């Protein structure tokens, strides 16, 4: 992929691609049975999405992820945070 493609994404979302890649990397290698890692990922997604997540919602998300034990992708987390 070329630089102009990433520049277009950055301009539309306002999120630097470095942050998106860092988040994707964290998700790819995360241990979804480790509450601390899962909580950090949820917090990072909310930060990147520029959405405040109340503690109760964060707790729900973390518990749901820990219970399922499955990995997540960015789309899954976006949907949990009320994205499209």
Image: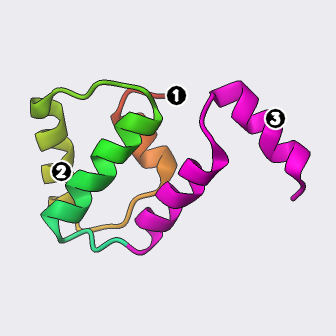
Q: Residue at x 17, y 70 (%)?
A: 34
- The spot of residue 6 in percent (x, y) is 79, 45
Callout in the foreground (3, 1): 3
| Separation (CA) of disc 3 from disc 1 | 19 Å
Camera-side residue: 76 or 15?
15
Q: Is residue 64 above or below residue 11?
A: below
Q: Is residue 68 visible?
A: no
Do the residues bearing badges 2 and 3 touch, measured as CB atoms within 8 Å?
no
Mark 1 closeness class: few <14, some 14–19, many ≥20 residues within 10 Å: few
Q: Look at the magenta stretch and give its main secondary structure.
A: helix
Of the two numbered discs 3 and 1 on the same chain, state the one appearing first in sequence.
3
Q: Secondary structure at mark 3?
A: helix
Of the two numbered discs 2 and 3 on the same chain, state the one appearing first in sequence.
3
Do the residues bearing badges 3 and 1 touch, measured as CB atoms within 8 Å?
no
Q: Is residue 7 above or below residue 17?
A: above
Q: Secondary structure at mark 1?
A: loop
Q: Which residue is mark 1?
A: 84
Q: Which residue is mark 2?
A: 62
Q: Residue at x 38, y 36 (%)?
A: 47
Query: In the rendered view, does 72 fall on the left or right side of 34?
Result: right
Q: Secondary structure at mark 2?
A: helix
Q: Is residue 42 visible?
A: yes
Callout in the foreground (2, 3): 3
Camera-side residue: 47 or 29?
47
- The spot of residue 20 in percent (x, y) is 57, 50
Q: Residue at x 90, y 55 (%)?
A: 2
Q: Which residue is mark 3?
A: 8
**Which portion, as a residue range, is magenta?**
1-29
């Amino acid at each position: 992929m070329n630089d102009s493609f990433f520049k277009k994404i950055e301009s539309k979302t306002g999120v630097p691609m470095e942050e998106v890649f860092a988040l994707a990397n964290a998700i790819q290698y995360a241990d979804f049975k480790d509450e601390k890692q899962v909580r950090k990922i949820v917090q990072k997604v909310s930060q990147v999405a520029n959405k405040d997540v109340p503690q109760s919602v964060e707790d729900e998300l973390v518990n749901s992820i820990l219970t399922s034990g499955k990995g997540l992708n960015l789309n899954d987390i976006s949907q949990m945070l009320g994205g499209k």
